[in-house]
């Protein structure tokens, strides 16, 4: 009998090992699939024109070059200013949006709030229907006078219905009502209750929404294109989009491309490497931001919060 159990346990262990190996191989393949395109972008941004013309897009260029980044640095003063604007609106917008959406979600999470159902429906309704771009433009420019101000770059993104619903759901599943009642019995006021109890417990959900906000605000370019005319307030994404448009015009204009100056410029213009350098500048901050949020992507922080 013991020998039969030993064989079954051995088979079970082998089966578990096989599953682990299979899972590891699948995840390794997916990881390589995701990493290769990103690595290719970095490599092409550092490849010379001649290497790209001869070998195409490859991970092993025949010659390395910083021409793509030098082309971007041709507008170094504007680039630095735009980068500062983008960093500011990303940091400020993320902090404010987390506070605003967290508190709104907390309000509709509380079952003792009288207008909880009505407010939840109103928030959900905005996900289905919106006024459109023209009414938004009129309100932002003529009523609020936000055009050509830095507020327009992050103020419209402070509260997003879908993220509020995500946070409300997180509160509902992870914060027991008994914890709220216990804090109220101890004399905690609403702001104290939220910032000292609910907010620390909800860090995983808050961090997820914060990461969404970082990606959204950092990559947002249409708002700046629509509302900003002052070059000192131009976000980085709008500037890079303008550089990309200039590259497209130079490379696709048939009259200029067939002229002697156009042929010479086409030979020397690092169009492909500059485009990839643009992509590197855009995605690198987000790649570095992700590890700071990853440590909060866990569950179960409320275990023991009531019983101690």
Image: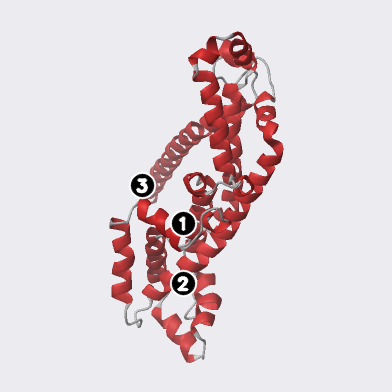
Numbered badge on residue 141: 1
Number of numbered discs on residues: 3
- Compute the Cα span from label 3 to label 2: 60 Å
Residue highlighted by disc 2 = 103
| Picture quadrant of residue 94 | bottom right
At x 38% / y 78%, what residue is drawn?
A: 110
Label 3's element?
helix
Classify 161 as above or below 7. below
Give the numbered dot on residue 257.
Answer: none
Q: CA distance from mark 1 to mark 3?
A: 80 Å
Q: Marks 2 and 1, Cα distance to the nearest angstrom?
A: 28 Å
Which residue lies under the disc numbered 3?
Answer: 4
As rendered, which of 99 and 234 lies closer to the eye? 234
Residue 137, percent across and down? Answer: 41, 53
Residue 81 appears anywhere in the view: yes
Left/right placement of residue 191 relative to residue 165 reads: right
* Percent position of residue 132, x then y: 34, 52
Identify which residue is drawn at 61% across, 19% down. Answer: 60
Q: Which of the pair 266/170 is nearer the observer?
A: 266
Which residue occupies 49% across, 35% down? 34
Q: Earlier in the sequence, mark 2 or mark 1?
A: 2
**Residue 1 seen in the current view:** no
Where is residue 146? Give x, y as percent: 51, 58
Earlier in the chain: of badge 3 and badge 2, it is 3
Instruction: Rate crowding at label 2 as few (under 14), some (14 to 19) or many (20 or more) other CA atoms within 10 Å.
Output: many
Which residue is at a point 53% across and 52% down the rendered structure image?
A: 214
Q: Secondary structure at mark 2?
A: helix
Q: Is residue 6 or residue 203 the one in the foreground?
A: 203
**Residue with the most extreme front position:** 142
């Amino acid at each position: 009998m013991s020998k039969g159990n030993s064989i079954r346990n051995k088979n079970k262990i082998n089966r578990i090992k096989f599953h682990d190996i299979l899972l590891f191989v699948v995840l390794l393949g997916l990881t390589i699939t995701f990493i290769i395109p990103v690595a290719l972008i970095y490599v092409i941004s550092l490849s010379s024109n001649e290497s790209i013309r001869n070998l195409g897009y490859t991970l092993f260029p025949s010659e390395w070059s910083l021409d793509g980044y030098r082309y971007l640095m041709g507008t170094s003063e504007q680039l630095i200013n735009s980068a500062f604007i983008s960093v500011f609106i990303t940091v400020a917008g993320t902090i404010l949006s987390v506070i605003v959406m967290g508190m709104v979600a907390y309000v509709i999470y509380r079952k003792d709030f009288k207008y909880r159902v009505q407010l939840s429906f109103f928030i959900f309704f905005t996900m289905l229907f919106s006024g459109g771009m023209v009414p938004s433009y009129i309100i932002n420019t003529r009523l609020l006078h936000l055009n050509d101000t830095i507020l327009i770059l992050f103020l419209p993104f402070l509260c997003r219905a879908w993220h509020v619903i995500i946070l409300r759901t997180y509160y509902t599943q992870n914060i027991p009502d008994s914890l709220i009642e216990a804090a109220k019995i101890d004399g905690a006021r609403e702001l104290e209750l939220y910032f000292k109890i609910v907010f620390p417990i909800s860090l995983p959900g808050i961090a997820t929404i914060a990461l969404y906000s970082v990606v959204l605000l950092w990559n947002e370019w249409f708002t700046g294109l629509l509302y900003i005319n002052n070059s000192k307030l131009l976000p980085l994404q709008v500037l890079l989009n303008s550089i990309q448009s200039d590259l497209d015009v130079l490379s696709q204009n048939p009259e200029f491309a067939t002229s002697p100056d156009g042929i010479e410029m086409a030979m020397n213009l690092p169009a492909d490497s500059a485009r990839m350098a643009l992509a590197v500048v855009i995605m690198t901050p987000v790649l570095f931001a992700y590890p700071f949020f990853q440590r909060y992507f866990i569950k179960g922080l409320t275990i023991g919060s009531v019983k101690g």
